[in-house]
Image: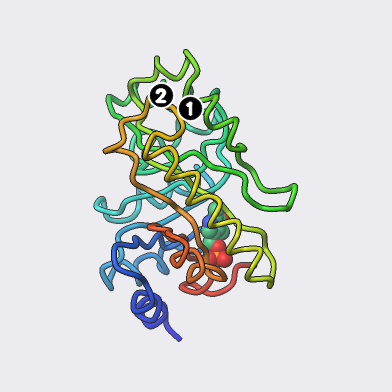
Amino acid sequence: MSIAQNLSEIKSNLSEGVELVAVSKTKPSSAIKEAYATGQRIFGENRPQEMQGKAEELPKDIQWHMIGHLQSKKTKYIAPFVSLIHSVDKLSLLEEINKRAAQNDRIIDVLLQVFIAKEESKFGMDEDEVIELLNSEAFKTLPNIRVVGLMGMATNTDNEEVVRQEFKRLKSFFDSIKNSSVSTPLNFTDFTVLSMGMSGDFKIAMEEGSNMVRIGSSIFGSRN
Ligand SMILES: *Cc1c(COP(=O)(O)O)cnc(C)c1O
């Protein structure tokens, strides 16, 4: 099937209010143009320089989301234009994003990546680390970032129940921040995004309360 057909199939399966991030990492700009032509505007990348190159070449109304692990020193490549960074996993990265955002005279929206999977390899913070970060003195001094929600990746397994429990847990943590059952200095009207679900598990993620899904291979085909 074509990219346009894949997109239309996926969109027909999205629950109301769920945003689609089309994950175009490793794929050529021509593939992004095909998706863009159908009206898709949010694209996800995981390498800063690749995102920068594509952003220079492609239409300016694309919203670029950084979804992969971000090294602090590479933040400068995306700070001028990135629309949302999903993968903040430590305070020092938040400080660097704040600095680069200030240099570009912008406020950059970010999600905190929470570790929910069983695998060792997935990046992210655990719940205690998130709360500690949000309540740290240093966090109060970052006027050029806005924490708008959380992101998580479930274990890569065929066991749907494991995946469902992990998403459920993240939704419950998200809600506890949102309704202040854990204390944080966040502005709750800004705290609205729960990014969870990929090609293999986005339906479960939506059932468990995701409002942003990140889908790559089901749109653009498998990556090498
Ligand atoms: C690659 C990637 C995706 C998309 O994965 P697919 O299985 O191709 O849909 C989503 N989220 C993150 C963080 C990724 O790195």
Alpha carbon separation for disc pair 2 and 1: 6 Å
Give the residue pinned by disc 2: 98
Residue at the image point whose x is 42% and y is 45% from the top: 175
Is the residue 122 above or below the residue 158 in the image? above
- The foreground one among 11 and 104 is 11
Q: Position of residue 185 (x, y in %)?
A: 38, 24
Residue 30 picture quarter: bottom left
* Residue 120 appears anywhere in the view: yes
Residue 62 picture quarter: bottom left
- Hey, which residue is sitting farthest front in the picture? 181
Q: Position of residue 63 (x, y in %)?
A: 32, 51
Is the residue 214 above or below the residue 204 in the image? above
Give the residue pinned by disc 1: 94
In this rendering, would 43 be left or right of 124? left
- The foreground one among 98 and 48 is 98
Secondary structure found at label 2: helix
